[in-house]
Image: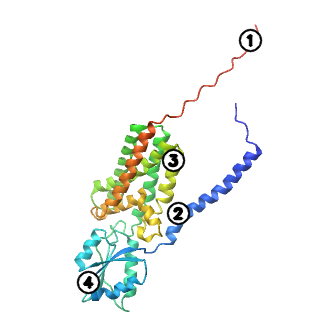
Amino acid sequence: MSAPAPSGTATTRRMIAVLVLVPVAVALALWAFAWPAARIAPRDLPVGLAGPTEAVAPLERGFAEQAGAFELHRYKDEAGARTAIENRVVYGAVVVTQQGPRLLTATAASPVVAQLLTQAVTARAPAGTEIPVTDVVAAPAGDPRGSALGASALPMSLAGVASGAVVTLLGLRGTRAAFTLVGAAALVGITATAMADNWLGVITGDWWAQAGAFGLTVLAIGAAAAGLAALVGQAGLGIAGLLMVLLGNPFSGMTSAPEMLPEPAGLIGQWLPPGAGGTLIRSVAFFDGAAAGPALLTLALWAVLGLAAVLVGARRPGPAPAEPATRTPEPALAG
């Protein structure tokens, strides 16, 4: 039998729900994606100063004029500043020598920040003074602006949520679901590295470390999606999508830097797998894994907790199978 047609009141309610929910969803998406992009500016951005105290004092006062914009680190000489950049302690450094100031940058850490520091130091230099700029850790020739690596946050988020959704919708539970998530993440990591490293040349570094970073990012997202679905039902997939795609992607700071996003977006982004994954991938791709510990811990926690939720959810009784409808016997035909 066909389902009864909805009444006029029910139809009106559905129309109102659509008219209200669509603008709200659009407004939420614009807030999540457009707000961080429109408010990009340095906020406690780590920057180094190297040289004699009396020589760097004017630069230090100049940076301090922008309250809350820069977090200054002092170093004795250029070697100390270079080491700090290579270890991802600072994004760049100004070195004051007898010949004048020099700027050290790292476009591999963030081309946007490198350009910002170049403009800031040049603006504070005497008129007509040329500031030599040295790119200590340069971005690869295949992606000098970092746009390709920045664009990888969304595909990784989508791949993770998709893997969790497929596992859930196919009815995989328990250890089978966990092994499927791990295997899918490993294959995605290998595929992504083959494309980004071997084909496009937008990342460098140890090949398997990069594959592990991509794979762990996808596993953390996929396990979180499948784990939420195992605990609260298919609504968990929607929650995971909101967290990982709507918030995690624009708050990741992959296109600029977490310290360039409005507060607390940058901090929240590093707590979510897309942002932590982006930081880990950048560290292993360009900095030999320097400063990768916090991001690695964040991804590991999401992955472990998500897989644990998948295993715990498997012990919960599934929905009872629907009983077959009793068929009314047809009356006997008259002889």
Quarter of the image with the C terminus in it:
top right
Which secondary structure, mark 3? helix
Distance from Cα at disc 2 to Cα at disc 3: 20 Å
Badge number at residue 51? 4
Which secondary structure, mark 2? helix
Number of other residues with Cα within 10 Å of mark 3, as a class: few under 14, some 14 to 19, many 20 or more: some
The residue depicted at 60 percent of the width and 60 percent of the height is 26
| Residue 167: quadrant of the picture | top left
In the image as oriented, which residue stretches furthest toward the bottom? 127
Residue on which disc 2 sits:
32
Q: Amino acid type of disc 1? A: Leu
Q: Amino acid type of disc 4? A: Gly
Q: In x, y percent, where is residue 94? A: 31, 81
Residue situated in front as seen by the camera: 159 or 243: 243
- Name which of mark 2 and mark 1 comes first in the sequence: 2
Residue on which disc 3 sits:
236
Number of other residues with Cα within 10 Å of mark 1, as a class: few under 14, some 14 to 19, many 20 or more: few
- Name which of mark 3 and mark 4 comes first in the sequence: 4
- Name which of mark 4 and mark 2 comes first in the sequence: 2
Distance from Cα at disc 2 to Cα at disc 1: 68 Å
Residue situated in front as seen by the camera: 297 or 18: 297
- Name which of mark 1 and mark 3 comes first in the sequence: 3
- Name which of mark 2 and mark 3 comes first in the sequence: 2
Residue 20 placement, left or right of 335: left
The answer, for residue 75, to whether it is visible in the render is yes
